[in-house]
Image (spheres, grey):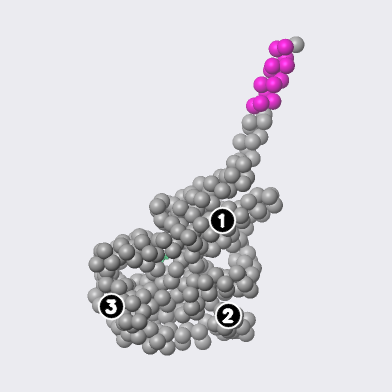
Amino acid sequence: MKQVWKQWLGVSVLVLAGMSAASARDLVVAEVFAPGHVIVKSEELMASRLAELTKGDLKIQLKHSAQLGNENQYWDNVRNGSLDITRINFGVLVNDVPAAKILSLPYLFRSREHMWHVLGGELGKRIDAEVEKTGAVVLAYYDSGSRSFYTTKKPIRYRSDFEGQRIRVQNSPVYKDLISLLGGTPVVVGYDKVVDAFKSGEIDGAENNLPSYMAAEHYKYARYYSFDEHSSVPEVLLMAKKTWDSLTPEQQKAVKSAAAESSEYMKKLWAEAESQALAKARKEGVVIIEKHQMGVGGIETYAVKLYSKYVTNPQDMATVLSILRSE
Ligand code: GTR
């Protein structure tokens, strides 16, 4: 009898262990940045919080350093459900999410507080709905500061400085048109190929926030950084709708909480990353052209011509006006 009892207990323990192993699930996250970058640190925090909140049922497998390709591929794969989660720049969504065109417009936000305020309001709701239609779910946003131009041969100070310059942009019609309007030639290059493009002379400049300019070592090739701060497009954490729908309501709640916590954490890290990047840029001899040393007004006059091309319906018009008018 004793023997039978022991056998029953042994089998039950095995069955229970098997059940919990089967319910634990790995969610793959695709990321272009490498460990040590503030974005990766924030994703690591999301991973540990998610494991805690779900008691180990949901685990994050972070595929950093572009192991799974580039951001355009992540966006395709998250929508078709073959990738669970990604963090990409919101500008990448521009061809599929109408509101992304608006967010990409130059000189739209006055400050990062302004951008966060707008994202927390009606525009945020509009984005959630538009993204969901494409097959993905917005989990949270990360700070991305603001983007400015940097060049190899001569600094950008005035609109006329763009003439004859080949400027790298993300694969976005808005950015391509912006460079053309300013008098330069846009060149679409993946973020991971920008250094090669500088080395081969394919491009004379690019645009990005200061931490990304420093982290990817673009400063070694483009020594002039002109702080015009033309756009503030946030980073976005997205989950495949297919993955989202397969989670229980409790798990969905845990995913959203872990993502929101990592977003708050990232905001703090980002402020530090910006000041560290500036200190390093100065130390490395980058020539910083401050906003007040530039004719930004003249650049803006050309850049805002984009609004009439991309703001073409009453809904977009209302959105843009409400952003420009909001505090
Ligand atoms: C960075 C952003 C990356 C990538 C890159 C780019 O600021 O964090 O996700 O989009 O810009 O310009 O391609």
Mark sitting earlier along the chain (2/1): 1
- Magenta segment boundaries in residue numbering: 2-14
- Of badges 1 and 3, nearer the viewer stands 1
Regarding mark 1 in the picture, which secondary structure is present there?
helix
Q: Is residue 87 above or below residue 96?
A: above
Mark 2 and mark 1: span between their CA atoms?
26 Å
Q: Is residue 12 magenta?
A: yes
Q: Amino acid at mark 2?
A: Ser
Mark 2 and mark 3: span between their CA atoms?
33 Å
- Of badges 2 and 3, nearer the viewer stands 2
The residue depicted at 70 percent of the width and 12 percent of the height is 3
Say whether mark 3 is within 8 Å of ligand 1.
Answer: no
Q: Which residue is under mark 3?
A: 155
Q: Which residue is under mark 2?
A: 326
Q: Amino acid at mark 1?
A: Glu
Mark sitting earlier along the chain (2/3): 3
Q: Position of residue 236 (x, y in %)?
A: 52, 63
